[in-house]
Amino acid sequence: SLGAEGELLIVPHRELMCIPWAALRDERGQHLIRTHAVRVAPSLRVAAEARSRAQPSRTHSLVVGNPWPLAGDQAQLPFAEGEANFASQHLRRLGEVICLKREAATVAAVCAAMKGACWVHLACHGEVKTKHGIDDDYSAPCLAFAVNDANDESNGDMSMQQLAQVSLA
């Protein structure tokens, strides 16, 4: 039996690494991720190394949900807003939570709030952009954020490459 709240570390062997451990349920049928931090690591050494590298200077979490209005004809994501509320509620156990929803969730605001974040949860549209005429084989995954400034050159789009370049420090 697991404690009321806490952390569960799973170190699966070989092909057990493919099991969706976040889907585990407790004796009441509730998902464990509602009450426990479920971590999966390929070995105890990796888990210990990750813990030792944790940066206590990171003080907040960022949650983004249902960015709106969007460029183009994408619909709102009302369940993403609910997801953001749920994630925010649980991340408050770790400290401060910055929750950007609807028109507040611009590329600039998200990038600024990512600095110093220990967790980042994004509940937004994603799509694959293709540049026709340049290289028909070219495609890039892209996240869509709110556009509420006519001078926003990003048009609300943020590529995975741009996201990876945001410094969390």
Image (cartoon, rainbow, N blue to C red):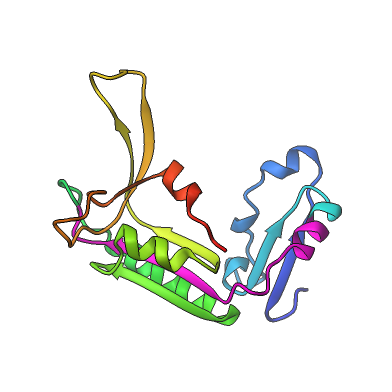
Return the x and y of residue 127 as percentages of the image width and height.
Answer: 33, 40
Q: Is residue 133 left or right of residue 56?
A: left
Quadrant assignment for the N terminus: bottom right
Residue positioned most to the right: 45
Q: Is residue 161 magenta?
A: no
Which residue appears at 13% of the width and 57% of the height? 150
Return the x and y of residue 17 as percentages of the image width and height.
Answer: 72, 44
Quadrant assignment for the C terminus: bottom right
Return the x and y of residue 94 as percentages of the image width and height.
Answer: 59, 78
Q: In the rendered view, tell whether residue 6 sits above or below residue 125.
A: below
109 or 89, which is in the foreground?
Answer: 109
Which residue appears at 28% of the width and 61% of the height? 67
16 or 149, which is in the foreground?
Answer: 149
145 or 93, which is in the foreground?
Answer: 145
Q: In the rendered view, tell whether residue 81 sits above or below residue 19.
A: below
121 or 161, which is in the foreground?
Answer: 161
Q: Is residue 61 magenta?
A: yes
Determine the image quadrant of residue 30: bottom right
Which residue appears at 60% of the width and 67% of the height? 33
Which residue appears at 71% of the width and 71% of the height? 7
State the extent of the magenta-drawn residues as a range.
Answer: 47-70
Q: Is residue 40 left or right of residue 105?
A: right
What is the tally of numbered marks visible in this picture?
0
